[in-house]
Amino acid sequence: MPSKRPSTTPLEATGGGKKSKGGPAASGHKKKAAGTGLKFPLGNTATSCSEKLFAWLIHPVTVEQFFEEYWEKKPLHVKRPDARDYYSGVWTKATAEKTLAKHECRFGESVNFARVEDGAKVMHNGEEGEKATVEYMQERFEEGVSCQFMQPQRFSKPCHALMERLENYFGTLWGANSYLTPANSVGFAPHYDDVEVFMLQTEGSKRWRLYDSPDDDGPLPMDYSRDYTEEELALPYFDEVIEQGDLLYIPRGTVHFGCVSPGGYSHHLTVSTYYHNSWGELLQNLLIPGALAKAMKEDVAFREGVPVNWMRYMGRLMAPVTAETAAREAGEDEDNASDDDEATAEEEEDDSSMAVEEKEVEKVARVPPQGETQADPEALMRARKAFKGHVKELIAKLERICR
């Protein structure tokens, strides 16, 4: 069975209000969005906004370091002892109460109430479809019941702005849920998700334990898990308190279990992405579905997420690419080789020069880049070439699996 996670331990980065050396423009978090009190940075364009927003989200870890070391690989805990209000203004307990008072938030649609009792999750919702009230939430909170607010960006402009910028940067959908957990309480049983999860601790603190999955599901599973009991799990490889202002990132497939100490409460906002956004699913409609399903089950390369915002450099200035055209275009060099004896000396020299250039490109662009690329035709060409080359490699793997 393949290893479920790297043997290296999660990073515990520490950051405050100061800009990290050699890091991104994360100091922009000092700027406020007008009228919201939210501290994430705003740029002059949608692209600059999105780039700065994600850099701010994970500061002081750089975007490059995050994608190279942590994305889809291992958890990341960013500690901010000097910036406890880092995520203030996004979504708070007070905001949730105002939302319940102002909007038609119904049980099972906008809010859920739950608590783990005797090792199993027990729902404490009112009648399905009925409107939840502030009084109901406060009463359940006093009883030790957690409140899950689903897709709060529908009701909060700062939260909506956060999600909008993340979607623009990653080029795919994001979802959000907030979790308000009373003191000495557990809201949800241990489980793993089928998305990449970023937990923003907005208020209070919560102790999180991370485990390897007891099931034989390999890394980067495509579906969320069942609820586990603590007895099923081995010792956690991560056991720490996430304080207000901290960030915890966990790749999909990471079993996580949170509880609140007797002395306080916890409120965190989970934002998540890359639901069914893997290489295998990108190719699924272009190739034989049965073969792809087998490949996705047997080879983690097909379950890895596609590059962040890949459509930006595959669609800008150039025609879109498909598996068929990628394979065909990647083989054009071989087709052209048969015409060498008809080429002129000048053409042969050009071909030779181009071949050398392509080899140099391959050295620096073997893997498609993550995130935004600069509006540079040469950079876009390298990104596109790397993307097509990776598709060709996956097709070759698929052929070997299906033999």
Image (spheres, helix red, strand yellow):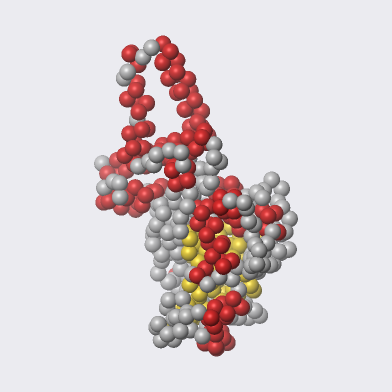
Q: Residue furthest top?
A: 345
Where does the image place residue 61, in percent across and percent down from the top left? 63, 52
Q: Does residue 161 lie above or below 344 as drawn?
A: below
Residue 394 is situated, as x and y percent measured from the top left of the image, at 37, 42
Does residue 382 sit above or below 267 in this rendering?
above
Residue shown at the point (26%, 47%) measured from the top left? 288
In the depicted view, which residue is nearer to us: 172 or 117?
A: 172
* Image position of 263 with respect to 61: above or below: below
Q: Position of residue 22 (x, y in %)?
A: 69, 45
Taking the image as drawn, is residue 12 in sight? no
Which residue occupies 63% across, 72% down? 203
In depth, the one of 56 and 68 nearer the eye is 56
Quadrant housing the C terminus: top left
> Where, by quadrant of the figure, is residue 205 drawn?
bottom right
Name the side, left or right, on which 303 lies relative to 261. left
The answer to whether residue 330 is visible is yes
Q: Residue at x 66, y 63 (%)?
A: 34
Count of numbered marks: 0
| Nearer the observer, 283 or 134 | 134
Residue at position x 63%, y 56% from top? 42
Residue in front for this viewpoint, 155 or 22:
155
Residue 242 is situated, as x and y percent measured from the top left of the image, at 62, 67
Question: Is 351 positioned to the left or the right of 135 in the image?
Answer: left
Q: Is residue 42 above or below residue 310?
A: below
